[in-house]
Amino acid sequence: MSEQQQKLIDLIADMNEEEAIKLANSMLDSGYDPMKLLEHCRAGMDVVGKRFESGEYFLPELMLAGEMLTEISKKAKPLIQESQTGGAASTKGTVIIGTVHGDLHDIGKNIVTFMLDINGYKVIDLGIDVPVDTFIDSIKEHKPSVVGLSGFLTLAFDSMKETIEAIKAAGLRDDIKIMIGGGQVDDTIRDYTGADAFGLNAMSAVSLCSGWIKAAA
Amino acid sequence: MTHDSTQPTRIEFDPDGVAIEPRPGETLLESAHRAKVRIASACGGRGICKSCIIHFTGGETPPPSPSDRDFFSAVKLERGWRRACQCSVSGSSRVHIPARARAESTRMQVDGSDFWVQPEPIVASIEVKLTKPSLNYPEADFERLVEALNQEREPTTWSIDPEAARNLPEVLRQNNWAVQAVVRNDEIIAVQPVKTRLVGLAVDLGTTNIGLFLADLHSGTTIASTGIENPQGIYGSDVVSRVGAAATDADKAIQMQRLVIDAINQRVQGMCDAHNLTPWQIVDVVVAGNTAMHHIFARLQVRGLGLAPFTPVITGPLQIKTRELGLACAPGAQIHMVPNIAGFVGGDHTAMLIGISAHTEKRTVIALDIGTNTEISLLHNGAITSLSCPSGPALEGGHISCGMRAAAGAIESVKINGEDLEIKTIGDAEPIGLCGSGVLDVTAAFFLSGGLNPRGQINREYRHTVLQDDEPVFMLHQGETNVVFTQRDVRSVQLAKGSIRAGIELLLEHAGLHYEQLDKVVVAGAFGNYISIESACTIGLLPPLPLDRFEQIGNAAGTGAKLILLSKTLRDTATNLAARSTHLVQAGNPRFNKHFMHTINFHDIN
């Protein structure tokens, strides 16, 4: 690994936002492979994730890292598409994510969104307080492999259950895996809502998706 | 297996020595609750927190639940440690409840700064002398009472509360036709012996504690005041859990309402006994609670409060007959529910605004009542803007690994003096845990002395750091019970204080102000009364202003509820204040999140 690559990974891991974006930009400007560059970002993000799990980093660092990587990929992604003659960048799969109706919590959902994004998934973020019909329409349109339902409030578990029942009633349930998260979910809640799995943090959302999509491939 | 019917299964609870027969399927927490044995339960028995840790010391020890298996080390499980909400007993057992789980709060401070108000009660007593019924004048008791009242007062169309009517013949005859009628507008709500003292009850209905005040409605003096724990604690320590429980299970909602009514009745009876009064002398009641407590108390549906857009059933004032809710008072006494401002800014905040005289305030003031939900108001140019932010129980010692109520043995303050920790506990007892003010002090002291970095990470090299299961923790006290402060605890404090400070910043930003422009920061509430303002500023919970701009005024909501009880004018003022307060929505507000991401750290923000 070149010195430059390692430096980018370190800058991201150490939350050095300004420097990291500057270096990434100058690498891309001098013709560095955008796919490889995003690979380094992922490596940097892995370090951030590990530091979060060890207690060194907390929510603000995850958010900041997310903003940093969004900024870098904004520049890198169009370059990838250019280089891949005519076709869109290949993704591991599509994930639809949203905070269920009646709930407005979005910090955790946003972190899951960019963690999936940086790990190579195409993520459709439907936002907060998402009506059941919006989920259904979006599933029909994007044909995702995974749907992630987020909610923090106790009563949001009812909204999750409703959403999943509606997906079932629309005949879409068999084609997708559904994960829930946000706050105090556990296996009882998973069973209650009818989801396939629950996750306690953004890292587990990534590993759930990769497990399912690998298995399907 | 044979069942020995002469030997019923029993759970014995130490150190109280109380025993009860467990019911099938009941958790140990529920058995203990039925036996009236106190076991703390911050999360309401959902297996999320660790406040209900207990120890099986004899008899049958139930197998650990899957979640307890993750929760305790193998050694602890082997030695009989469980969480009371995670196990059920089928055989006979002996259970020891550690002090931390038993502790009841001693900080039930109910009195705020007391100031006098011209009593102007909504009820009045009128002494009347009736003529005895005779064949010449056989008019009904009520009509003769009305006739007598119309001689004393401007004649009007009187009505009588049916329960007061039921007692009427007896009261008239026992008192030889000389009585006092207690009236509220045109309604006779009680008929009593003459010179019966008119008593009012003000209730500060908090999620954690309930403050009760008996006041003389003529003189305005407080006869007695006391604090009790809100018995709904078994359904969770914060409003979100309570609303969740009440909204999903109608029986729980009824049970929660009865728990509060029973607790108030019992305590009011005790207060009355001590002052030669009876509850039927209570002719007016004012209740100020957050919107969730308000709704549960008044038996209103809470479902709307549990989900966005957090719609209450009612924000305006609500009058309910006491007997309709089961409160023991004078026959026709009414409860005035202090108006709410919004879904999460309730009548307790309205009462607090009265308690701090917000209606006459000319300066720029932030007033906040810190609790599991923190309500904050900004008073600026005669306008009031309020919001509420979720702050969780951490600042009250809940969901903290060694957290406890403010009871004997709770560490209430910590200072670092050179190399040493200076620890002060309530009652100067041996430390067994940390209460809210201690949680704040520990965080501030360790941050200042290099134990925490500005992001809140525990420094492994710090002199008071020890490794526990390879995780760095602060060791506060080593003894019979070790008292430690973990990384997760620091994170809980960060979330709580970050949320409150983000709320303050959102209000200031909305008004185009900087915290430097605040003339005053008023910290109300029992918890706020005990915290060190210096520590709160150090960790960024409060803005870094000169200490003389802060004022800790104790239970202003209680004071306000009492004032609303005593003065008709202030009752109307409160209703106006609630109606003209602007509510700023915090949930889902991207600016709130933006502030939160900064205020969650220990950096000083500008």
Image (spheres, coloured by chain):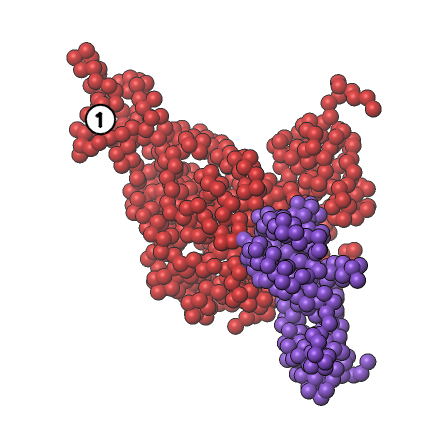
Quarter of the C terminus of chain A within the rendering: bottom right
Residue shown at 27% from the left, 27% from the top: B180
Q: Is residue A35 above or below residue B382?
A: below
Residue on which the image places disc 1: B146
Q: Is residue B39 above or below residue A121?
A: above
Q: Is residue B89 above or below residue B381?
A: above
Q: Quadrant of residue B514?
A: bottom left
Q: Nearer the viewer, residue B461 or B593?
A: B593
Residue shown at 29% from the left, 17% from the top: B173
Residue B185 drawn at (x, y percent): 27, 36
Residue B484 drawn at (x, y percent): 70, 54
Colour of chain B, in one word, is red
Q: Amino acid at mark 1?
A: Val
B17 to the left or right of A129: right
Q: Residue furthest bottom?
A: A30
Colour of chain A, in one word, is purple
Q: Are there few (<14), some (14-19), or many (20+) residues within 10 Å of tag 1?
A: many
Residue B110 drawn at (x, y percent): 47, 45
B550 to the left or right of B98: left
* Label 1: which secondary element: helix
Quarter of the N terminus of chain A within the rendering: bottom right
